[in-house]
Amino acid sequence: MKKSSFFLNFNKTEHLFAFLLVMILVAVSAIYFVNAYNAHPAGNFSTYADDTYIHLRFAHNLASGHGIVWNIGDPPVEGSTSLVWMLMLAGIESLGFQPVWWLIYICAVCAALAIIQSYLLLQTLSPDTLLENLTAVSLLALSPRLMLWALTGLEVAFYAFVIAACAFLYILYRKGRVRSWLAGIAFAVASFIRPESMGLFAITLMFDGLIEYFKGNRNYRSVIWMLVSFLLVFLPIFLWKWSYFGYPFPNTYYNKTGGGWIQIQTGFEYILTNFIEILVPAGLLGVLFLFGIIKNQFSVEKIYLLVLFLSFWFIVAINGGDYMLKGRFITPSLPILYVMGGIGLSWLTSKFDRRYRIPLLTLVLVIGFAAWNPSESIAQSTINKPLPNARQGKTKAMISTPEFVAMGRALKEISEPGESIALVPIGAVAFYSEMIVYDMVGLVDPVIAHEPFDLKYIEDSWRPGHDKGNGQHILGLEPTYILLVDRLTDEPLPGVDSWALQYKSIAELWVLDEFHETYEFFPIKIRNGWYINLYRRIEAAP
């Protein structure tokens, strides 16, 4: 890329504005590392998602020499959402480091890499619009979605970087700068980070073939090399996985799909909800991108970005979306969206006199800062934050993962070697308790995962990964403890509530005579007056 396209055509004001944009980008990007420092993932108020602890449990068992297993001695199961992410954590632990501490910083680095990769992609596509490119990536860095998921310890930011890198390599190939086989290898790696990448690669292959066809060249050598390189990396690992785990796809895939029209309908509702939430300013900039294409700024590379982005969202939709809020499965596409937004921004500024360029870009930044106040994205330090006291009739000061962490630590103290527990939120409880843990919704249980959906559990509420269950199967495993109410309470709470009954395994257990004959209510009082409302197998009682 020519130096003249960077600075030689800038006036003094534009030089100053470029410097200011770089400083904004650095400052906003630093928030990710400030958040990582403040998060204190091993404390009482971890920002990790419960699914993160599923990765950590698998990684620990692998690093300890037991294989990719959920419970030591059980058959292997691919129960984490990202094989590469889990293997990376296992590698860190094998080197003597505790990934629970380092993971939050790895996520911050991955977010920074996604931002840098987006900038490189923009500079490749539009090298003469540095100011617009810096504005777009500053807005990407500012995105509360990316900041949120970088705090959860999941593979979201990593996958965002890898998908942007796949697009970057493909576009470099289209521009004649690299060989097509590099893009094939990148997509093969991405397929083991998230299996949806297989679909994105298929779309990329078809797109490339159609371009060659309509150009009249009919030279498919590069397309073939892209496919061959993909298969050379993908097939050996895929066949090994199939042999090792017993199934071609992750257990989570079988657990979350098969819902038919309900799955597809709610998947598109998930897409619509997320589109509305990111409309300002990302979606509006994307509209400018479309205007630019319509107004004779057509190029194969720009069309590819649009096709890749739409395919990404379509695949997420037909797979049913996600039960988590804030678009876990959509967020990795944000770098592509903001790259398109940057191109759209360049088209917009080109329609005005040069003296309006900086005011327009400033306005876009102000809108972004107004929509997403950066100070609100800075995580408050929880390093010295104590576990709150239970207070009857008062709203709890913690929910979800912090509760599960407290449960796991308490169970570690009271459980005996060889004891087991069946519950729904398996991640943090399994990681901290080190007990044998049975999954009542089937994320790590192949028996439940491969069962068909029961319509009455999905027609009113679609929660991918949480709608399957089998109470009789869980009872047959003879767990020492069963947790029906998956939250801490300020006094013992026997029985079930409406929240617990939405889970199929719990609803079925509660109406089984065998359950009531073989299990007794066994609340455990833990620190600060909280109760874990367990049911204990009667023969396990001392």
Image (cartoon, grey):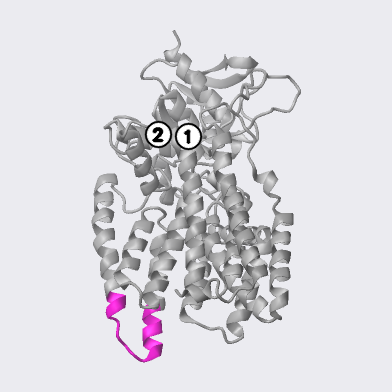
- Quadrant location, the N terminus: bottom left
Q: Report the label total.
A: 2
The x, y position of residue 185, in whole percent, is 31, 63
Residue at (53, 61) in percent of width and height? 335
The x, y position of residue 266, in whole percent, is 59, 57
Which residue is most to the right?
A: 393
Which residue is most to the bottom?
A: 216
Residue at (53, 71) in percent of width and height? 6
Q: Nearer the viewer, residue 85 or 263?
A: 85
User: Is residue 132 found inside the magenta-colored segment of the image?
Assistant: no
- Quadrant location, the C terminus: top left
For residue 134, the mark is none
Name the residue that disc number 2 marks: 57
Disc 1 to disc 2: CB gap under 8 Å: yes
Report crowding for label 1: few under 14, some 14 to 19, many 20 or more residues within 10 A (C-alpha).
Answer: many
Q: Which residues are magenta?
A: 208-224
Distance from disc 1 to disc 2, alpha carbons, whole Å, reads 8 Å
Above-or-below relation of 471 to 219: above
Side of 541 where 285 appears, left or right:
right
Q: Nearer the viewer, residue 408 or 106?
A: 106
Name the residue that disc number 1 marks: 427
> Given the image, on which type of amino acid does mark 1 rest?
Gly
The x, y position of residue 180, in whole percent, is 32, 72
Which type of secondary structure does the marked residue at label 2 adopt?
A: helix
The x, y position of residue 26, in whole percent, is 57, 52
Residue at (41, 50) in percent of width and height? 254
Residue at (63, 25) in percent of width and height? 385
> Given the image, on which type of amino acid does mark 2 rest?
Arg
Q: Nearer the viewer, residue 226 or 461?
A: 226
Quarter of the image where one finds residue 507: top right
